[in-house]
Image (cartoon, rainbow, N blue to C red):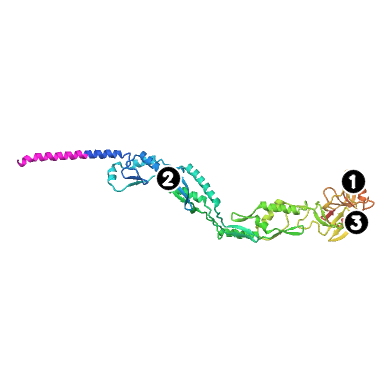
Amino acid sequence: MSRLDKRPKMKKTTRMILIGLAVILVVAIGGYTYRSTHYSNHFLPDTFINGTEVSGLTAKQANDLLHERYDAQEFTIEQDGQEWKSLKKADLGLSTDFSDELETMISQQNNWRWGLSSLSTSQQNLALDTAAFDKQTLNKQTETLSQDIDALNDDRTETENAKIDKDEDGFTIEPEKQGDELDTKQATKAFKADLLDGQNELELNSYTKEPTVTSDDEDLQKELDELNEVAQTKGTYQINGKDVEIPTEKIMDWLTYEDDEVTIDQDKVREYVEELGEKYNTSENGTKFDSTKRDEVNVKPGTLSWTIATDQETKALSEDILKGEDFNRAPAVEGSADPSEPLVDDTYVEVDLENQHMWYYKDGEVSLDTDIVSGKPKTKTPTGVFYVWNKERDATLTGEDYESPVDYWLPIDWTGVGIHDADWQPTFGGDRWKEGGSHGCINTPPGVMEELFEDIEVGTPVIVI
């Protein structure tokens, strides 16, 4: 056969080959396209999510697989290296439904690359947000955990900050104490952070409470210095002619430190002032008096008296103390007497009803004395510590059934009782008061009364016993 006879046959063979190749290509492309369509709702080959293979799975299938894995996860809390509590993350509010996120992952992958993924030797690693917790559930479980950790502290030694203490000499710093108490707040805070970060365990002993204030703290030293400066203040009252020192321990007990300055507890100061009043108020307490004939007697309160003004004195005393300087003061009072001086000093009038006698002492010496006539049995002369609050000449004393003019009148109380001359009395002293006594006043011989009136000053104490 000639060369011309062979040529048509070769062209036919080549065409058949090309047609076959074309058919193969079409089939291959169709198959690849079909497979690519499959991977439009399935994960590509060699795809791993958080370490779990999900190749060829739908979002639902992958979600079921991952749900099973994460639903079994636990968070372990250890104490001294030993398991103390193990909590299922699902019970802590962990969301194990990743459907939406998985659907998004599939929609974002290039399904036409499934062939390359099959041929590649490297994995495609995807990550889920596995820290999605229900806030309400997690907070509730964390609160329960907090209470359980607090209960552990019942058997642990408390950690204490350095603090200001006091002894007999003043304020001192008590050093901090390191215990093995757990810091519940920090431990629960770390628990939530680790849980949300995907961690699985926590050691409680890593959260032992540490002192936050130590003995070398500058602010604590400043507080100490300022407290001691005020605490060492020496406060002295002048009451009834005597010094009454305020105990240092009292002042120390009143002091506090707030907002970077020394302050004073007003309630405690008030309590002390009230105690002073209960002890010294001459309006409520009797006065010891050395009488001329009856030795020491206790004379009940009268018009010459004072009462500590509690509100005013509390404020004034607090201000004096906070100055940090030694001070002497008389208490603020209401009444007719000076609280700093003795209620009865060395100038006074003594009226002894039992002996029906009166003495006028001036500068400690008897200036005059005389028998008197006091109130009759039904209108007895009141006893007490009184004072001459006025001097009046030619007065007329009146009552329901009497009107008596007198030359000299020295009132001593607020009810009309006083000392005056009585020229109608035939005698003075003895038992005259029982039948011819007054309506309460102290009847005095006219000549003696004139002398007394001229010499005595308004304000002079009159002690009636």
Q: Percent from the top left, x then y, of residue 135?
A: 47, 43
Amino acid type of the residue that numbered disc 3 sits on in the rendered structure:
Thr
| Disc 3 to disc 1, C-alpha distance | 25 Å
Which residue, as the protein is rendered here, is positioned at the far right?
Answer: 426
- Relative to 236, residue 103 above or below: above
Residue placed at 54% from the left, 48% from the top? Answer: 151
| Disc 3 to disc 2, C-alpha distance | 110 Å
**Residue under label 1:** 403
Viewer-nearest of discs 3 and 1: 3
**Residue under label 3:** 370
- Relative to 67, residue 261 above or below: below
Residue 2 magenta-highlighted: yes
Nearer-the-camera pick, 321 or 42: 42
Amino acid type of the residue that numbered disc 2 sits on in the rendered structure:
Gln
| Pointer 3 or 2: first along the chain | 2
| Disc 1 to disc 2, C-alpha distance | 109 Å
How packed mark 3 is, by other alpha carbons closer than 10 Å (few <14, some 14-19, many 20 or more), is some
Asked if the residue at tag 2 contacts the one at tag 3, i.e. Cβ–Cβ closer than 8 Å, the answer is: no
Q: Percent from the top left, x then y, of residue 265?
A: 65, 53
Asked if the residue at tag 1 contacts the one at tag 3, i.e. Cβ–Cβ closer than 8 Å, the answer is: no
Range of residues picked out in magenta: 1-25
Q: Is residue 333 visible?
A: no
Q: In which quarter of the image is residue 249?
A: bottom right
User: Which mark is drawn over residue 73?
Assistant: 2
Amino acid type of the residue that numbered disc 1 sits on in the rendered structure:
Glu
Nearer-the-camera pick, 234 or 137: 137
User: Which mark is drawn over residue 381?
Assistant: none
Viewer-nearest of discs 3 and 2: 2
